[in-house]
């Protein structure tokens, strides 16, 4: 496995500037790979759509959604029964919907990339990314500095298969160690 430092950028021009800086330092194009990453959930990797059944940070939301639906449905049934059978059905449906929504939202957490797995991803931001393979241990810090200098919004450290200038097993859902985030708004 190869150690890889990944910089995520908002602008392709920033990525190009970082890439050119690294090329001027002696890296070759076979040491780098660049991609455009679709927004989280838009990679079409899961049969029913999206990238997984649920994301990291949302794996408990289904349980509280079911509980919320049951409680909300019962409350809606009771209140709606004042309006007769049709009111009871409408109240139960509305209560179940609102209860499920509130239950699911109550148990959501911000995804932690370090806890992510392919089954429960914490996907990086969309946009251009530059991946650089690490050939010497001291390069990790240097690549981080170069990416930050040229406007990376996030920098991750990971491992993967690298062949002929390509990160062959790249998966945006993979586990990474986030080294840098520009601010709290960056996933």
Image (cartoon, helix red, strand yellow):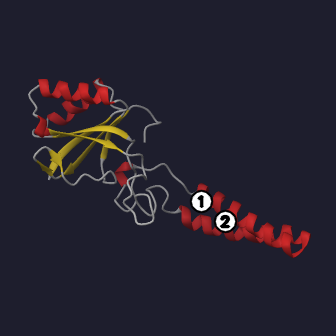
Q: CA distance from mark 1 to mark 2?
A: 8 Å
- Give how far across and how far down residue 133 sits, in percent: 16, 41
- Kind of element beneath mark 1: helix
Is the C-beta separation of discs 1 and 2 under 8 Å?
Answer: yes
Residue sitting at 19 percent across and 30 percent down? 142
Mark seen at residue 68: 2
Q: Quadrant of the C terminus?
A: top left
- Give how far across and how far down residue 104 sits, in percent: 59, 59
- Kind of element beneath mark 2: helix
- Give how far across and how far down residue 117 sits, in percent: 34, 58
The quadrant where residue 44 appears: bottom left
Of 177 and 147, nearer the camera is 147
105 on left or right of 54: right
- Give how far across and how far down residue 114 sits, in percent: 35, 50
Q: Residues within 10 Å of mark 1 (few under 14, many from 20)?
A: many
Residue sitting at 79 percent across and 72 percent down? 89
Residue sitting at 35 percent across and 29 percent down? 11
- Identify the residue under disc 1: 104
Residue sitting at 31 percent across and 30 percent down? 12
Query: Is tag 1's residue or tag 2's residue first in the polypeptide sequence?
Result: 2
Check the image and report above or below for 126 versus 118.
above
174 on left or right of 64: left
The quadrant where residue 68 appears: bottom right
Of 124 and 44, nearer the camera is 44
């Amino acid at each position: 496995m190869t150690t890889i430092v990944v910089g995520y950028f908002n602008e392709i021009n920033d990525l190009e500037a970082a890439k050119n800086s690294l090329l001027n330092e002696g890296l070759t194009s076979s040491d780098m790979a660049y991609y455009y990453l679709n927004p989280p959930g838009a990679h079409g990797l899961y049969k029913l759509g999206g990238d997984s059944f649920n994301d990291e940070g949302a794996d408990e939301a289904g349980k509280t959604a079911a509980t919320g639906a049951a409680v909300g449905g019962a409350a809606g049934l009771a209140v709606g029964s004042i309006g007769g059978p049709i009111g009871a059905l409408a109240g139960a449906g509305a209560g179940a919907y609102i209860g499920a929504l509130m239950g699911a939202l109550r148990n959501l957490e911000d995804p932690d990339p370090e806890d992510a797995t392919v089954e429960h991803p914490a996907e990086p931001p969309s946009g251009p990314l530059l991946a650089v393979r690490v050939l010497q241990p001291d390069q990790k810090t240097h690549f981080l500095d170069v990416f930050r200098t040229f406007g990376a919004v996030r920098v991750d450290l990971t491992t993967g298969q690298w062949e002929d200038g390509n990160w062959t097993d790249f998966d945006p859902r993979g586990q990474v160690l986030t080294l840098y985030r520009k601010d709290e708004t960056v996933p």
